[in-house]
Amino acid sequence: MAYEGHWGRTAEAAVTVNSGSRLGFRFTGDSVHALFDVSSVTVPAQIYVSVDGGPKRLYAVDREDLEITAAGRGPHRVELSVKDVFSRANRWTPPLETGVVLTGVRGRLLPQRPVHKPRFAFYGDSVTQGVMALCEVNTSDCADGTAAYPTLVAGALHASLTQVGFGRQGVLRTGNGGVPTASDAYGWNYAGSRADSDRHADVIVVNQGTNDTAWGSAEFRTAYRAYLDTLRAAAPHARILALRPSTGAHADDIAAVVAELADRRVEFVDTSGWLAPAEGDFNGDVHPSAQGHRKVATD
C-alpha cells in the first residue's frame, strides 16, 4: 500500500481524518475488497475510488466491506482518495465519529514499486480541506478535498501530497470536531497518533488566519510566528510559503512575521486579486468554489 497524507498506521488499521488523503495499491484478478471499521462512525466519510486511471466512483464509508471490481485479470491499480471527512463531527479523539478506518484489503495484492517525487505539504483550515468547493452548504456532499488547491497543485507538479485542513481552525482558534489549534495539532494524525515527519518535505504551504479575526495583531503575530518556527524546526530544508488568506484576514500581520524571520526560504505569497466573487470563485463569502480552487492552483 502506498499512502499519501496523514495516516495513523497500526497493525490493526490505517486511519485518516483528512480530506485529500489517498492511498494506492495494485492487484490481480477481477476484484478486491476494501475493509473498514465503521463501528463508531456517525457521519460517514466520502471517498473516491478509481481503477486503472478510470473515472472516479463516489462511495460513503458506511459499510465494512467495499468490493472494487476491474475488467480482466490485471494487473490493476487502485487509487482511493478521501473526498471529505465532515469537519463538525468528532474526528480528533477516538472513538472517532468520522474518518476512514481501513482495516485491510482482501485480494491478490502486488508489491508497490517505489516512486520518488517532490514532497509537498499543505496545512490550513476549511479552505485547505475543500469545504463548500462544490456548493454553498457545509456538508460532505458540498465538500471535496480532491477539488481543492492542494490536490490540484500536487497533481500538476507530480508531487506527493500531504493535505491537512481543519474547518474553523486557526493559529489561535481551535477547529471543529475537537481539533486543537494549528500549532497543537501539528505533528499528529489525531489524538494519540503521531504523524510522519515533514523532515524531508520540499515545500510546505500554510493557509491560516481566516479564523483568527477575533484576536488582535499582537496576539496573532506571536502565535503565527510560533507556528512557522514549529514548521521550520520540523522541516529544516523546506521552502515554506505563507499564503495571504483569500479573505485578507491578518494579511499585513502575516507579511510582517515573514519579513521579521529573515529566512530566505520562508516567503509571503500575496493572493490579492486571485479570486473574484463576481466571477463565481466562491461558494458563500469565504470558501472558494471548485473554479476558485483551480485559479489558486494555477496562480
Image: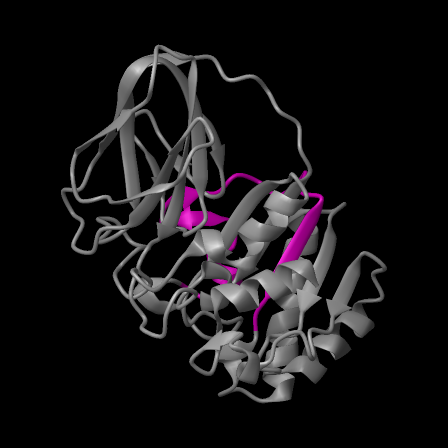
At x 67%, y 33%, the residue is 117
Q: Position of residue 147 (x, y in %)?
A: 48, 56
At x 77%, y 64%, the residue is 267
Q: Is residue 202 one of those drawn in magenta?
A: yes
Vertical relation: 121 (above or below) 33: below
At x 20%, y 56%, the residue is 43
Quarter residue 247 falls in: bottom right
> Relative to 31, is 5 on the left or the right?
right
> Relative to 219, is 109 on the left or the right?
left
> Would residue 106 be seen by someone viewing this image from the given angle?
no
> Would residue 218 be seen by someone viewing this image from the given angle?
yes
Q: Is residue 205 one of those drawn in magenta?
A: yes
Q: Quadrant of the C terminus?
A: bottom right
Q: Position of residue 91 (x, y in %)?
A: 30, 55
Vertical relation: 246 (above or below) 20: below
Q: Nearer the viewer, residue 253 or 207?
A: 207
Q: Nearer the viewer, residue 144 or 248?
A: 144
Q: Nearer the viewer, residue 167 or 145?
A: 145
Q: Quadrant of the N terminus?
A: top left
Q: Position of residue 54 (x, y in %)?
A: 43, 33
Vertical relation: 115 (above or below) 40: above
Q: Position of residue 212 (x, y in %)?
A: 51, 80
Marks counted in the figure total 0
Quarter residue 208 falls in: bottom right
Vertical relation: 243 (above or below) 54: below
Looking at the image, what colour scheme do you see?
A: one colour
Residue extent of the magenta highlight = 180-208
> Relative to 273, is 263 on the left or the right?
right
Q: Nearer the viewer, residue 226 or 77?
A: 77
